[in-house]
Image: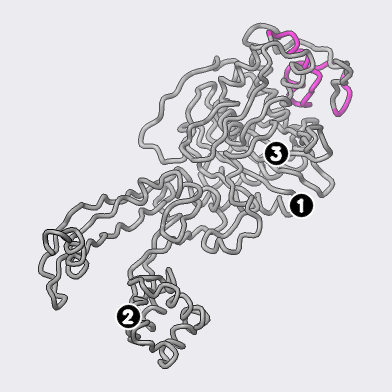
Amino acid sequence: MQIIDTNKLIKEGNARFLRFKNTQVIRGTINDRNGKPLAISVPVKGIWVDPKNIEQKNIIKKDIRWNALADILSIDINLIIKKIQKNKTKRFIYIARQIPLEITDYIEKLKIPGIHAIEEYRRYYPSGKVAAQLVGFTDIDGKGIEGVEKSFNKLLEGKYGIRKIIKDGRGNIIENILVKSKTKSIDIILSIDKKFQNITYEILNKAIKKNKAKSGTAILIDIKTGEILSIVNSPSFNPNNISNIKNISTIRDTAITDLFEPGSIVKPIVIMKALQIGLIKESSILNTMPFKLQGYKIKDLNTYEQLNAKDIIKKSSNVGVSRISLSMPSTLLKNTYHEFGLGKLTNIGLIGERKGVLYKHVHPSELEKATFSFGYGLMVTPLQIAQLYSTIGSYGIFRPVSILKLKNKKNEKQIFPQEIIKKVIRMMESVTTPGGSGVKAAVKGYHVAVKTGTVKKVGKNKKYINKYIAYTAGIAPSRKPKFALVIMINEPSQGKYYGGLVSAPVFSEIMSNILRLTNTKPDK
């Protein structure tokens, strides 16, 4: 028999005395920049049964302890019986997972033959809805399936070890050998400040409800480092109870996954480039009367006969930037947008980030060139817009954005002349002054440089419809820039839809709180 049935006998023998046991690794925590937890693992237990053992004894219906087990787990006793009978040849099946310790203590005290508890860990998210899309969540086995949990899963989960355990005939352990060492999990420290995240979420969420909007996104960046201090989406969901999620779209981190036309918030870039190549001067006066291109009328909300560069930004003149764009080589503005980070990945490290698109035509039409200058014909993420304004705030130094707290600055590059950007920042300050398009974005006690935008959305038939996106993006304090903030409100439906009316007040309220919390000295 030893010669003929060698493999079978070895297998049968090993089944009686040899076991391989995984040594568990506790998943790493996710913390904010100040060490406050955003995701932690709390101990729980799984309840399992040996069906073969139970089936042999046929004791389920006769033992009242089984009914007590079913009651405490809120599971129908007949479902438990059915599951055991279906798997009667197996030696291990779960009855319930991730059960709180106080319940498993009660179950263990019942001392039901064949019922056992095994150590597990459940993920808990102290911030709940406030950071849900960013942090994400795990599945029941602790594997990240959304957000930071998924993007940094390999670091967070580590690798379990394996021990070889040999028992004698009476079940006593006679050997316990380490076969494979476990790899410790790594804690993740995000660039997020939990206080800022809470403030940004509360104010944005309030605005979404007030304007009966479909959704909204807000991103705050530290201009000096490129670190993201808050990144929120509304509506959100409770990651501690994902079974109650009604709208699956709320899981997405819109800041990196969804593409939108940016509208007028790109106009400062047009003015910057025109000043750099000498196409215009600060004192230049442009004809801003409406005109037609290919049957399409280029016009402003109000008609202006002529405007200078500052007033083109202040009044958000489509006509003004269109005339400037039409005087540029077709690829110049596209390349400038791209240089500032529009239409390319930020490489933030989060799974699901989309690249976006700038127009693909080598030789765009005159109409395409005109609309491109006021933010139509390109698709970008809200994060790309935030990076754009962070670059403006750093006077043309392009710093990669980071969702992780930085020990050292990343590679940075001066991509635009500092003196020109400073001139345009001063122009952008006029947006919040009387007559500007973003008066409601003003922050009491500080100079801020902002730009508002309003974009019509494209419907299923690829034609523009009467639904809008309201933007406000800017930097503060604009004389000594510290923070870049972008607000996007998607499909407001309470009558108002212009960026200057819908998103500008949100910018003002969030930035006021941030400057106060950071003890930023008011301007004289």
User: Is 310 covered by the magenta stretch?
Assistant: yes
Q: Is residue 230 shown left or right of residue 63?
A: right
The residue at the point 78 percent across, 13 percent down is 366
User: Is 133 covered by the magenta stretch?
Assistant: no
Residue indicated by mark 2: 53
Residue indicated by mark 1: 212
Q: Which residue reaches farthest top? A: 278
Structural distance between the alpha carbons of marks 1 and 3: 20 Å
For marks 1 and 3 on the same chain, the one whose residue lies earlier in the sequence = 1
Q: In x, y percent, where is residue 353? A: 54, 37
Decide: is 87 above or below 36.
below
Secondary structure beneath dot 2 equals helix
Q: Residues within 10 Å of mark 3 (few under 14, many from 20)?
A: many
Structural distance between the alpha carbons of marks 2 and 3: 70 Å
Q: Residues within 10 Å of mark 1 (few under 14, many from 20)?
A: some
Q: Which residues are magenta?
A: 301-329
Q: In x, y percent, where is residue 379? A: 66, 30
For marks 2 and 3 on the same chain, the one whose residue lies earlier in the sequence = 2
Decide: is 175 above or below 171.
above
Q: Is residue 475 shown left or right of residue 66?
A: right
Residue 18: image quadrant is bottom left
Q: Is there CB contact under 8 Å for labels 2 and 1?
A: no
Q: In x, y percent, where is residue 56? A: 34, 83
Camera-nearest label, 2 or 3 = 2
Amino acid type indicated by mark 1: Lys
Amino acid type indicated by mark 2: Asn
Residue 317: image quadrant is top right
Residue indicated by mark 3: 441
Name the foreground residue: 258 vs 333: 258
The residue at the point 55 percent across, 16 percent down is 416
